[in-house]
Image: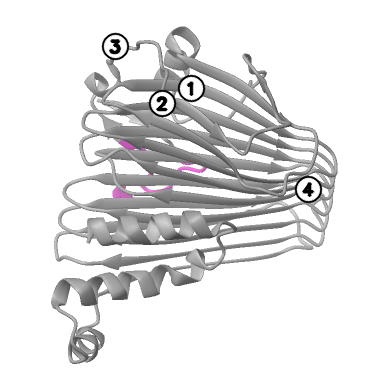
Amino acid sequence: MIKINETPCRTSNNYGVNDVLVDEKVFERKINTFSGFEAKNASGIRFLNKSDAKNAKIISKILDNQRKNQGNFVKKIVFDKSQEETVVLNFKLQGDALVDTIEIEIKEGVNAKIVTNFDGNKNAYHNGLLKIVCQKDSRVDFAVMSDLKNDGNNFLSIDAKLFDGAVLNSHIIDFSSRYSIYNFYSSLNGDNSVSNLNVIYVSQKDNLVDLNCFQEIFGKNCRATIETVGALKDEAAKNFKGTISFVRGCKKSFGSESEYCLLLSDTAKSKALPMLLCGEEDVDGKHSTAIGRADEKQLFYVMSRGLDYDSAIRLLVKSKLNSLLNKLFDEGLKGQILEKIDGRI
């Protein structure tokens, strides 16, 4: 067994969230040429068959070495001009493996909206590194949605760097793989930069969702938020590890993290570890976490209006996710999420 996705600050081993143990055989996949990529609304955007993504935060060394030695998809995507339409990057995994390194650079003053979909059927495998560089005064609305079905495995590192005045609104949407492991890191290097991370997850069977979210603030008057909302059914498990670090010198900055998990069975398990690291006095930071169960009174009220039990549960889940669904920048993506929720619950 290999320890992966370790927290930036160790806590008591009794909590069982410092890292995740994964059988090494999970990573032993035959890596063939990948051809299931499609880009929509991408005219005027530069696609380069290379990447300068280095020194990124990663889930584990074994995954990093696999990308370097066996990677089958490498791209650098450059946004030189603002885009009105949402750029959609689709990856279809037909039971095969995608081992990718993608770097997205948003030039100074450019606005961009990007959706990245990883969709796979039985036995799909994804090991990805996504690097996002937001130059001065750029604004990026970014979403990644992963649905590799129940026996797939998804390992995704997202590494973001923000310069002066840059705004990055990130959305992670996960619909349950056997392992759904995420490492999100953002470095707010420039003054007045903003990084907001929203996570939606729905997991079932005996699947595991592990979220390691780390926002590090260096610049003055910055804002960093982490908000996650999800639902677990059957014997699914979720670990939330959220960290906001105020580095000395980041005066007048603000950081906030909140996490809510809805348990739909007695055997589902949720663990949360929110942390604030403070090296600067003149800052404002807060965190909260909560776990809830399906409210019997609410279910009774909804069912008394003519819905069956499954429909009532779906409605309850959607209502809990609604706060983050309303923050999505693309109506088409929101519709896809609601459709997938209906298919899972």
- Along the line of sight, the residue nearer the viewer: 153 or 272: 153
Is the Cβ of the residue at disc 1 closer than 8 Å to that at disc 2? yes
Decide: is 126 above or below 141.
above
Amino acid type assigned to the residue bearing label 1 in the image: Asp
Q: Is residue 13 visible?
A: no
Which mark sits nearer the N-terminus, 4 or 3?
3
Secondary structure mostly seen in magenta is loop
Instruction: Give the crowd class for mark 1: few <14, some 14-19, many >=20 residues within 10 Å.
Output: many
- Read off the residue under disc 4: 166
Q: Quadrant of residue 335?
A: bottom left
Decide: is 277 above or below 231.
above
- Read off the residue under disc 3: 30
Instruction: Give the crowd class for mark 2: few <14, some 14-19, many >=20 residues within 10 Å.
Output: many
Amino acid type assigned to the residue bearing label 2 in the image: Asn
Residue under the image location 73 percent in, 44 percent down = 83
- Read off the residue under disc 2: 127
- Read off the residue under disc 1: 100
User: Exactly how many numbered labels are in the figure?
Assistant: 4
Which mark sits nearer the N-terminus, 1 or 4?
1
Is the Cβ of the residue at disc 1 closer than 8 Å to that at disc 4? no
Regarding mark 2 in the picture, which secondary structure is present there?
strand
